[in-house]
Amino acid sequence: MRERDKRHDKAAGFSLIELVIAMAITLTVMTIATTMIAKSLKVRARENRRSDALADAQRALNLMSREISNAGFRMKTNGIVWQDSNDDNSIRILANLNKYTGETDNGVTEAGEDVKFFISDNTQYLVRYDKNRPDTDPLQKTVLANRVNSLYVFYFPQPVNYTTVDCNNPITVTTTGVTKLSGSNIANATYVVLSLCVDLPAEGTPGSPGYQPASQTLLVSDVALRNVSALSY
């Protein structure tokens, strides 16, 4: 019995050096795992923000394209108010949408007939402003999208081919002999190209695990003013 106890007493455990090495390996593995988890969480948060921002901007661009295509409906102009349409941040459109609804009003005085799209000052909000709605109507000003860095509107006298570039220089026209219209010449536009630049803020701080730098995404749409060639009364 005593001999068995002696044999057990001789069984060696971890030495101090082995214990330190094992702890160092464990800490290294835990650090790597924590870094990977932090990185994946930041990437996921960034992609969620990206998806939300791009979805909002794309919906806004689709709505703008649809309403702008109706500009000039049953009017003697293309429906673009050039005096209130800026190349790089706004466009205002008119349409006589209720001309054939049996209503006595034959002007552009109803909701949805005088609309302006613009980037709100000091914010990144793309706003739809309905001039004919009262100030108390919450639909007078509607935020269509946020994180929008810029809105560029290009006016042309005819359909054009173009390539997209970046947020600072959204498009390059490849159709020869055609240049964009400005000022009072916008009244002659039959084709409009819209571009939105969406800002994606940085996720985390530089040097931290999973840091995602800030970036920008460009969305572009083009619209033919289908009522320009229609017979007006």
Image: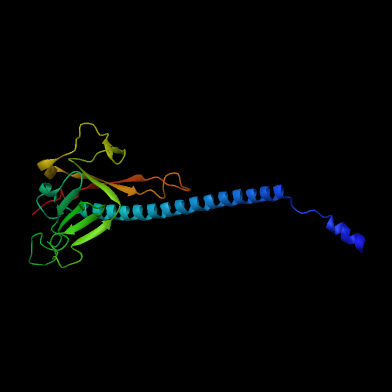
Left or right: where 225 falls relative to 34: left
Residue placed most toward the observer, 134 or 164: 134
Picture residue at 14% right of the left edge, 40% below the top: 182
Left or right: where 217 falls relative to 143: right
Above or below, 221 against 173 in this view is below
The quadrant of the rendering that contains the N terminus is bottom right
Picture residue at 15% right of the left edge, 60% below the top: 97
- Residue 116, by quadrant, is bottom left
Percent of width and height locating residue 117: 20, 53
Percent of width and height locating residue 143: 25, 58
Left or right: where 149 falls relative to 42: left
- The residue lying furthest to the top in this view is 176
The quadrant of the rendering that contains the C terminus is bottom left
Left or right: where 215 falls relative to 193: right
Percent of width and height locating residue 112: 17, 60
Percent of width and height locating residue 131: 13, 59
Above or below, 166 against 75 in this view is above
Residue placed most toward the observer, 122 or 69: 122
* Number of numbered discs overlaid on the protein picture: 0
Picture residue at 9% right of the left edge, 42% below the top: 184
Asked if residue 66 shows in the view, the reply is no
Picture residue at 87% right of the left edge, 57% below the top: 7
Asked if residue 48 shows in the view, the reply is yes
